[in-house]
């Protein structure tokens, strides 16, 4: 009797999970050309290609990076884009990444006679966007300062509140262009590359969505459809496979 009762409970739980999984709620920071506020962009196109052809509707919402991460942690969203692998221990990570983050260091040219890569960051005042957790990949002591916007980072660097700022090379260039920031006194050095992943909520639904991501990405890589999305978005140079 008890076994039958448990079977019925598990059966209805599976039905409920299947119904819930007909929609996936994705949250992300806004990155121009990649995760646009209107739901367009390379990363969102990839997510839609993975889930929508198998009947799962993709719901998208833009938030600051830290808030997006917290929403997944609290199970208020299904996954966020684009996390470093194992960036947070309360998220599930798939096998397949969708892009690579190239991190640049920006600093005043007269600050260092010779920039020796990551080692130059030792004990320096280093700024980056709140929640980006570059310190998980850079294992040296730094005086870390986080800001909510790139414009705030640039202004702080100009006022010598930071020695160096770290950011995705394309994102910081978009911010510089947006405010016509004069970069004649600054240098840019690429110091780090990290793969970017969707980070799923840590429960049954997250596990199911991760499984679907891995299966579908494998298929889309093999049949060439994933590559076509990069071509469509004029981003073939970024294709990771």
Image (tube, rainbow, N blue to C red):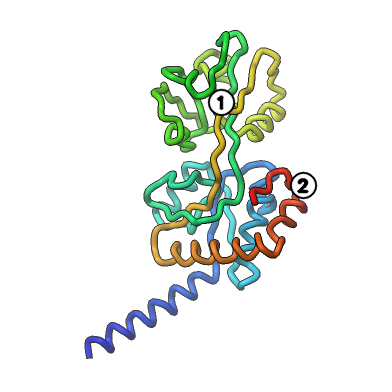
Left or right of residue 201: residue 45: right
Which residue does the numbered mark 2 point to in the structure image? 234
Q: Which residue is at a point 34% across and 79% down the rendered structure image?
A: 10
Q: How dense is the environment of label 1, judged by Cα within 10 Å: few (below 14), some, or many (20 and up)?
A: some
Residue sitting nearer the eye, 180 or 97: 97
Q: Earlier in the sequence, mark 1 or mark 2?
A: 1
Relative depth, front residue between 68 and 132: 132
SS at mark 1?
Answer: helix
142 sits left or right of 58 in the view:
left
Instruction: Kindly identify which numbered label has been placed on residue 152.
Output: 1
Q: Position of residue 78 (x, y in %)?
A: 48, 59
Image vertical order of residue 237 relative to residue 152, above or below: below
Closer to the camera in the image, 232 or 190: 190
Point out which mark residue 53 bears. Answer: none
Disc 1 to disc 2, how far (Cα)?
A: 30 Å
Q: Residue at x 41, y 29 (%)?
A: 139
Q: Residue at x 60, y 43 (%)?
A: 100
């Amino acid at each position: 009797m008890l076994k039958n009762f448990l079977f019925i409970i598990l059966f209805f739980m599976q039905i409920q999970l299947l119904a819930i999984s007909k929609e996936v709620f994705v949250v992300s920071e806004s990155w121009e050309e990649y995760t646009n506020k209107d739901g367009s962009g390379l990363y969102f196109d990839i997510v839609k290609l993975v889930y929508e052809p198998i009947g799962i509707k993709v719901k998208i919402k833009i938030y600051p990076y830290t808030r997006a991460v917290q929403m997944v942690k609290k199970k208020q969203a299904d996954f966020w884009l684009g996390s470093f692998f194992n960036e947070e221990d309360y998220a599930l990570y798939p096998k397949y990444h969708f892009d690579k983050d190239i991190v640049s260091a920006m600093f005043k040219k007269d600050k260092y006679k010779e920039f020796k890569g990551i080692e130059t960051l030792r004990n320096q005042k280093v700024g980056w966007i709140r929640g980006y957790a570059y310190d998980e990949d850079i294992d040296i002591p730094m005086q870390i300062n986080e800001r909510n916007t790139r414009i705030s980072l640039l202004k702080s660097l100009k006022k010598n509140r930071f020695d160096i700022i770290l950011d995705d090379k394309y994102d910081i260039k978009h911010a510089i262009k947006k405010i016509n920031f004069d970069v004649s006194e600054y240098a840019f050095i690429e110091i780090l590359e990290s793969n970017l992943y969707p980070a799923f909520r840590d429960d049954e639904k997250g596990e199911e969505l991760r499984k679907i991501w891995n299966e579908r990405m494998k298929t889309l890589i093999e049949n060439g459809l994933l590559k076509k999305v990069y071509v469509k978005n004029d981003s073939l140079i970024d294709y990771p496979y």
